[in-house]
Amino acid sequence: MNARAPLRLLLGPQRPVVNLGKAMTAAGVGDGRIAVISAAWQEAEGDIDDIRALVDNELYDLPLYRRAEALFAADKPLHEAYRNRQDQLIEQQNMYRLRLRQLTIAAREILRAEGNAAAIAEERRHAISQLRALDRHHLRQINKIYERFGEFFDTDRSRLLAEHIAAIEHDLDGSNTVLITGGNVVVLMNRLQLFGLGPALGRMNIVGWSAGAMVLCDRIVLFHDRMPQGRRDPEVMCDGLGIVPGTVLLPNAKNRLRTRETVRSSLFSRRFAPATCLTLDNESMLLMQDGKVRDSESVRHIARDGKFARVKVA
């Protein structure tokens, strides 16, 4: 393992322009063996020939999605408990979404309000504090659901789960770097959480794009202003791995956010403060080490006033 602090190389979507190979070379990831986590691709997990064409390093697949499917097939009680947990998580997210909608509408209207500056400022602070309080409550409820599952299904109670975790840790031995692809962030986070990979990954260099970058944050925030069925208010999904603390990462923000609507962007920034909201668009690159930005390309942060500004290197 490197004596220096691990690198965190965060990228945007790899379409239409691919910058993975170029970014890894510029970051100085090195020529050691790299583990690849592509669980967010689900059934396409392990189809990493395109990555091999871009990276000179030896790559090996860490099949978390397939391991989870094999585990569920062999341990029926665990699978049933896992499915019940997922149903509870969906129900909790739906209830949160119902409450979130009204608070978000009110907060945006107050941000647009005109009149007595002191009175409006106080109401704005209170409206944003209500959103933050709901987010915290939602995370507490989500974590309670995870904890109840963990009380009955952990490595002490499931021999098969313990065996899979031991095999994954063995596969990680001898590698300094792990590459985490984009894809379905819900599936990816569920598999990482199931196998308890946060501590092990935290000690490694990490290259992550899109969903593979989002899971590294303290909180995973879902967002989309341009859905066919209408806008979706930004919502907290769950705690992330906390490997890149103090950030909310927003892949493909140019296409998913209405960046010119400063009221929406301002509320986004203020609601998740003190975390910094960072965009990761196609061709974006953010290199961090020891909590500091070492390099940045086409990455923007959302300022308090809702405007987007380029991230500067520390």
Image (tube, rainbow, N blue to C red):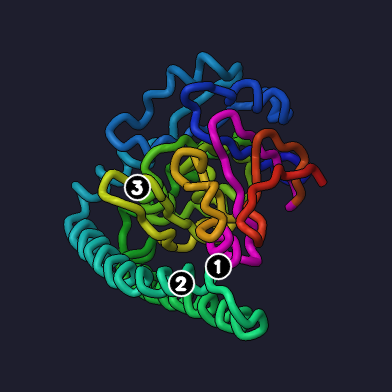
Labels 1 and 3: the sequence-earlier one:
3
Q: Which residue is mark 1?
A: 271
Residue 6 is situated, as x and y percent measured from the top left of the image, at 70, 44
The reply, left or right, for residue 299 in relation to residue 142 is right
Q: Which residue is mark 3?
A: 187
Q: Which residue is mark 2?
A: 135
- Queried whether the magenta region covers residue 284, the answer comes back as yes
- Quadrant (top left, top right, bottom left, bottom right) of the N terminus: top right
Q: Amino acid at mark 1?
A: Arg
Taking the spot 77% from the left edge, 40% from the top edge, the residue there is 294
Task: Identify the magenta region.
Answer: 266-291
In the foreground, 6 or 71: 6
Q: Nearer the viewer, mark 1 or mark 3?
A: 1
Residue 103 is situated, as x and y percent measured from the top left of the image, at 41, 74
Whether the residues at callouts 2 and 3 have beta carbons within 8 Å, the answer is no
Residue 231 is situated, as x and y percent measured from the top left of the image, at 35, 53
